[in-house]
Amino acid sequence: MNERVAIVGYKQTKHTVDSPVARERMIYELVKSLYHDMGITKDDIDTFVLASNDFTDGRTISEVFMVPRIGAYMKDETKVEADGLNAALYAYLRILSGLYNTALVIGFSMAGSEFRVPLTQAYTMDPAYERPRGLINFYSTAALQAGAYMKKYRFSDEDLAQLTLKNIRNANNNPFAARKEPDASVDTILGSRPLYLPLRQAHVSTYADGACAVVLSSKKTAKKFTDKPVWIDGVGHVMDTYYVGDRDLLAMNHLTAAAKKAYKMAGIKNPKKEIDLAEIHTNFASEEPVLAEAMGLFKPGSGKDVVKNGESAITGALPVNPSGGPLGANPINATGLIRLAEASAQLRKEAGQNQIKGAKTAVVHAQDGPGAQLNTVFIVRR
Amino acid sequence: MTEETRIIESTWDLTAYQFKIEADALNLFVKGLKDKKILGRKCRVCGTVYVPGPTYCRKCLVDIDQVVEVSQEGRLDAFTVSLADVRGKPVENPFISCTVKLDGTDSFLMGVLEGWTDWRSVKEGMRVKVVFKDVTQGALADLSHFQLI
């Protein structure tokens, strides 16, 4: 058995809405350059875990053509049909088992250019009740949740625009983000194309072509790879029922449960005080207060104050998505893993213009399913 | 359908997807076929000759830039007498699908085997040669079949 697992290397592509190369070349180049940066070869990796989705890739067993491109030829490999942070969870467990000391985790997607995200996501809805009527999809679910939050906590369209702007500005300074809107303002956000009110185009994450790779190692071998390991000290993974009609979209009790598991494991008693930053997987800007509050990072319903006081800004008491989050780039399946990479960058003081001073502990979140039906939470520390 | 189940009409719009593929590898192969040549790529590190040639070596994880023209003769590796299509429907004219290892290469090409009358006389290890279509267009179908020598 291994006792502790660290992130010893990470890299993401420069995400775009129309990749100049095919996905195979994209991940080949990403992984090769990660190995090069780390001064290792594929032979240093014991097991490979990929994240992809057949319904977003448009082909079954969607990782098979990728496997040789990451150096897994004649090696041990598996895949999760979910976000890359879940792949990291698999890899973490594999290393804990003691059977492996190192793992490469990779998530990738061509969500920017190869498929229509809302349409393909709609195929994942419940086939008996939800699909036939075509009312419920990822967008409308998020809009129902956003509307409920805004009504209950008097979170205005302007508040939502401010929150969106915070993320767009962070993304503007993130060299990997696909979305670059230096001229964005509350007015441009309020005036953007309405989709499912209160949601507008500006609130939607930026579906992108991109990939992210992370190398995990046991404590035993971590020193061999880096003198800046980022330790995974807590994990939690909880899902709610898939049928949207059975869920309380505002309460998000399953996310609270996942976060509590991770906090308990990491010995965190007061997340708001002990955590220095959060990287949260939001598919829509409106999810940020809902998810952050469910994770105990802010008081329930305090979204309005958090926005007003700048608490979640890079300079605030508890920055949320200093990278810009998925609003900057959402290459589905890589998105949660990117949160882990971005948090690692912060803890290793490698976050460039978006660097938070003295960050030691981060919470990382990923979701899957409509309205964050499935949630994964990591606590990482330097 | 039984009393316990019910059928719901459902569709999956495959036009929701488009696929970018790596152009270099396929382009090289079909360009060769147009000229009635078999082109592959050779890894400078391990010497593996791939046909069709990918742009990287699966074994070494390095780019492959060395294009090689390979022999149009080789060895019958394995074959199956195709009596049914993918839906299980019998085919009117049974044919042999086979894999062939062209001399000097490390990968197998799949194709149709011709030049036999009784499939029982076909044996693994027999020599074969590539036969192109008379008029080639730069497409995978330019490789018509493998002929027993």
Image (tube, rainbow, N blue to C red):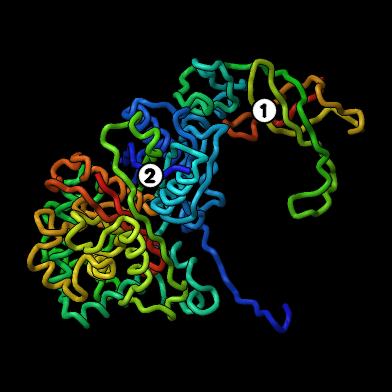
Label 1's element? Answer: loop
Picture coordinates of residue B63 (x, y %)?
Answer: 44, 24
Going 58% across and 20% down the picture, which residue do you hit?
A: B49
Q: Which residue is mark 1?
A: B108
Label 2: chain letter = A
Q: Which residue is mark 2?
A: A4
The amino acid on which the numbered mark 2 sits, given as a three-letter code, is Arg
Picture coordinates of residue A34 (x, y %)?
Answer: 35, 33
Q: CA distance from mark 2 to mark 1?
A: 45 Å
Q: Is residue B31 left or right of residue A36?
A: right
In the figure, A82 relative to A38: above or below?
below
Label 1: chain letter = B
Going 24% across and 69% down the picture, which residue do you hit?
A: A293
Q: Nearer the viewer, residue B26 or A53?
A: A53
Q: Are marks 2 and 1 on the same chain?
A: no
Q: Would you call the spot at circle 1 few (<14 residues within 10 Å), some (14-19), or many (20 or more)?
A: some
Picture coordinates of residue A193 (x, y %)?
Answer: 23, 68
Going 36% across and 34% down the picture, which residue do you hit?
A: A222
Going 24% across and 42% down the picture, which residue do you hit?
A: A345
Q: Would you call the spot at circle 2 few (<14 residues within 10 Å), some (14-19), or many (20 or more)?
A: some
Mark nearest the camera among 2 and 1 is 2
The amino acid on which the numbered mark 1 sits, given as a three-letter code, is Phe
Q: Is residue A197 left or right of residue A234?
A: left
Answer yes or no: is residue B44 visible. Answer: yes
Give the quarter of the figure containing the C terminus of chain B: top right
Label 2's element? Answer: loop
In the figure, A178 relative to A121: above or below?
above
Q: Is residue A274 left or right of residue A206?
A: left
